[in-house]
Amino acid sequence: MSRAEKDPEVRGSARPTLEAVAARAGVGRGTVSRVVNGSAGVSARARAAVEKAIAELGYVPNRAARTLVTSRTDAVALVIPEAETRLVAEPYFSDTIRGVTAGLADTDMQLLLILVRTAKERERLAAYLSAQRVDGVLLVSVHEDDPLPTLLETLDLPAVLGGRRSDREPLSYVHADNASGARAAVEHLLGRGRRAVATITGPLDMEVARARLDGYRAAHGAARPDEALVAHADFTEEGGARAMRELLERRPGLDAVFAASDVMAAGAMQVLREAGLRVPRDVAVVGFDDSIVARHTDPPMTSVRQPIEEMGRTMAHMLLDEIAHPGLPHRHVALATELVVRESS
């Protein structure tokens, strides 16, 4: 005999209803609705009866109807304002996605990945968010002049940034202690007797790049580093290679380089090899991220570890808190970094 034949509460219906759950639990429809939607005002006894009935009947809430009642979509967006080529080439993004996914794993939230590369795509995203198609937004790779954080403030939409626009960032954010990590990297090089330590920065319209440059300068103490040893790039391997060529032209006698990402450091190491320079004997190299790239260069790369997956998980948990508790004060979280020494330095 089928389940429907045995149980009149589900007979004639492939999908148990809210009313069927209420009848089985011996409570009103409104009580079932409050339990399903996670609302307060239900006794422990009634909640247990409803949860038992849901399990017995195999009831699945109607998501569309629930959205009308709660104004929730059960979806969050992870917005990355970069080209898909960077998404594939840079481990930072895949590690972030992995962390965010882990942070949402025990929830019913759907994760939408949205790439924003042009002004038109930004406009389309603004319209999408204004229509309240998601419950909250995670935004990474934050640039100082990016209008998206301001849009999120205007919409009063729960949002958490991976990084920040400045140290006065009003929105919630999670970032690594970039300045301290960079300082530790350069102090390590200076402590090994290197005297002409260059740096390859990320784009300076990003606070993360400025903080790592600040750490590089702080490591030199009162002895300001030669600005000819500073080259600017864009967090890509090609950018790191270009910057390394510039540095060798300006200061051919440099004996160390700190790159603000592993990917840029890998590009720099390739240029050093092409120039006939040995790493680390002639030029020591340190990167930042401690990504898979650092472990697979030749020689293996010394790098500053930032906990990227943990950052992603923390961002997701903070966003869930803001969604569940409207008006929650914004939080600013800085995670510690660690220098991982390998053969390149």
Image (cartoon, grey):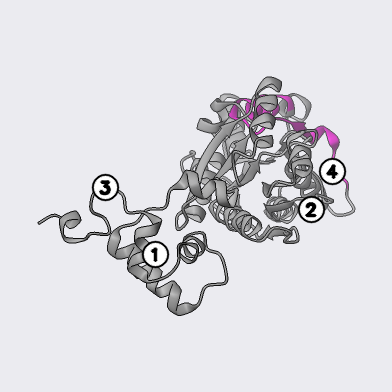
Q: Earlier in the sequence, mark 2 or mark 4?
A: 2
Q: Check if mark 3's residue and mark 2's residue have beta carbons within 8 Å.
A: no
Looking at the rendered structure, the kind of residue marked 4 is Pro
- Between 307 and 284, the one lying in front of the other is 307
Q: Earlier in the sequence, mark 2 or mark 1?
A: 1
The secondary element bearing badge 3 is classed as: loop
Residue in the image at 51% along x and 45% along y: 95
Q: CA distance from mark 3 to mark 2?
A: 68 Å
The secondary element bearing badge 1 is classed as: helix
Q: Is residue 74 visible?
A: no
Looking at the rendered structure, the kind of residue marked 1 is Ala
Q: Disc 2 marks which residue? A: 219
Q: Which mark is residue 225?
A: 4
Residue in the image at 51% along x and 43% along y: 111
- Expressed as whole percent of the image width and height from the top left, the position of residue 11 reads 23, 53
Q: Earlier in the sequence, mark 4 or mark 3?
A: 3
Count of marks placed on residues? 4
Q: CA distance from mark 4 to mark 3?
A: 73 Å
Span of residues in magenta: 224-246
Q: Few, some or many C-alpha atoms within 10 Å of disc 3 (few <14, some 14-19, many ≥20)?
A: few
Q: Disc 3 marks which residue? A: 14
The secondary element bearing badge 4 is classed as: loop
Residue in the image at 16% along x and 60% along y: 6
